[in-house]
Amino acid sequence: MNAQAEDTAESSVLDILKHVLVAALVVGAIGAFYYYSEFSLLYRVLALVAVMVISAGIFLTTSVGKSLWVFMLEAKQEVRKVVWPTREETMRTTLLVFGMVFIVGFILWLLDMFLFWGVKLLTGQGG
């Protein structure tokens, strides 16, 4: 049990070092992107993307990265289980929403008009 605790502690320390390395790489890459502004934008973007891919690879070797990867795979499986609406159902629902927005907007406009008229009468500004 003691060996297992030491492995966990070493793993935790290694994970923290990897997180610090990833953060340093990302901050350094963004800083370099702006520092080397005299170079072509294409080269700077390619270098930035390369460093981000390397950083993501390092991050995915940590325990948090592995659990995030597993979560994303499970989320992908869940999305496949979703029953998506047909085009007709989507169009019908969209038109219904537009219709309701128009009706509620018209009712609020009428309410606002009558309230404005009432306030003008109460303050003596309307005739």
Image (cartoon, rainbow, N blue to C red):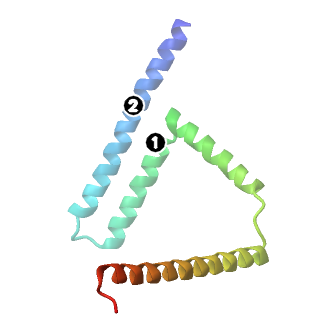
Residue at numbered disc 2:
16
Compared with 55, 41 (above or below) is below
- Residue type, numbered disc 1: Ile
Residue at numbered disc 1:
58
Quarter of the image where one finds residue 47:
bottom left
Residues at marks 2 and 1, CA–CA distance in whole angstroms: 12 Å
Quarter of the image where one finds residue 85:
bottom right
Q: Is residue 41 left or right of residue 115?
A: left
- Residue type, numbered disc 2: Ile
User: Tag 1, which secondary structure?
Assistant: helix
- Looking at the image, is mark 2 or mark 1 nearer the viewer? 2
Please provide percent x and percent y for residue 106.
55, 82
Please provide percent x and percent y for residue 73.
65, 47
Q: Residue at x 34, y 50 (%)?
A: 26
Q: Residue furthest top?
A: 2
User: Does the residue at mark 2 contact the one at mark 1 (Cβ under 8 Å)?
Assistant: no
Compared with 44, 9 (above or below) is above
Q: Residues within 10 Å of mark 2 (few under 14, many from 20)?
A: few
